[in-house]
Image: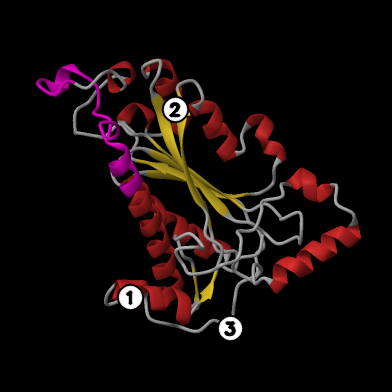
Amino acid sequence: MVEGVTARALTLSPRTDAKRCTPISQAADENDLVGFFLGRTEMATFHHSVKSGKKGSARRHACYIERLGAHGVHSDLIHSGYGNMPAWAEMDPNMFWGMADRYERSNGSAYREHEIALPNGLTPQQLIALAERLVRALAGSKPYHYAIHSPEGKLEGIHNPHIHLMISDRVPDGLDRSPQQTFSRFNAKQPEAGGRRKDSGGRSPAELSQQVTATRMLVAQTQNQFLADHGYHERVDHRSLRDQGLKRQPERHLGQRFVKDMAHAEREQYVLCRRSLGAASAFGNR
């Protein structure tokens, strides 16, 4: 992959007491997979959301994830990269997103973003390596731009590493196009006369639901394989608590402003409560 990267040093605490276990890819069948998740490992927090970015928002969002301009006040960027850009944007991904904002159709999506929580027991180098695996699995040959953020959690002061991955649905086909033509309507009969084909649309609600489930499973499998490869025994599970057979309610996201306004005693009580429910661990606490 053609890629540009930036990185900043950030101190995170690695795990040194992890045990190696069977990689998820070696699970024999679905029942064995359930046992793998529920019976033989510790659970880490899993979060994966996907959203579409409207025309006019792509370049601005790229600056946000890269912490450029006004977003430079944040000091949580530890790595960023991009790849699979056309020749005219090979050295500047922001130019690609700017052209998407300009030339995509008025009601079209300029990008799709995957936001994925990363295990916070990994070293910065391991976070970068895991992010690269996720990028390869999710972006394929399509243009992408990503950044790893690791802000400090307001409740307990533990880092919350996660990746923002922007992907264009415009699939490369080997044809050279100008920026305007790249985002024009695809011409199936004469591809050279139209824009790049968009790898989206035309799917039924059921197909979309299946795609989301399959993508979430892919993200979980990629993380679990990485954790196994590096000797960690924690795992993530993409399924809902109900599908996992767990009766507890999901933890409510409080938000930084809410936590900031908490009294000290109230904050301590909340931390004790979430730990008693098993919500906190070196790989899952936020």
Alpha carbon distance from label 1 to label 3: 29 Å
Magenta residues?
187-210
x%, y% of residue 151?
67, 52
Please say if 64 is above or below 79. Answer: above
Helix, strand or loop status at disc 1: helix
Q: Amino acid at mark 1?
A: Asn
Identify the residue shown where x is 42% and y is 36%: 112
Q: Position of residue 224 (x, y in %)?
A: 43, 68
Quick check: 175 above or below 263?
above
- List x then y, in percent, for residue 158: 71, 62
Say which residue label 3 marks: 17
Label 1 vs label 2, nearer the camera: 1
The residue mark sitting in front, 1 or 3, is 1
Residue type for callout 3: Asp
Badge 3 crowding class, 10 Å Cα cut-off, few under 14, some 14 to 19, many 20 or more, is few
Say which mark, if any, is on residue 124. none
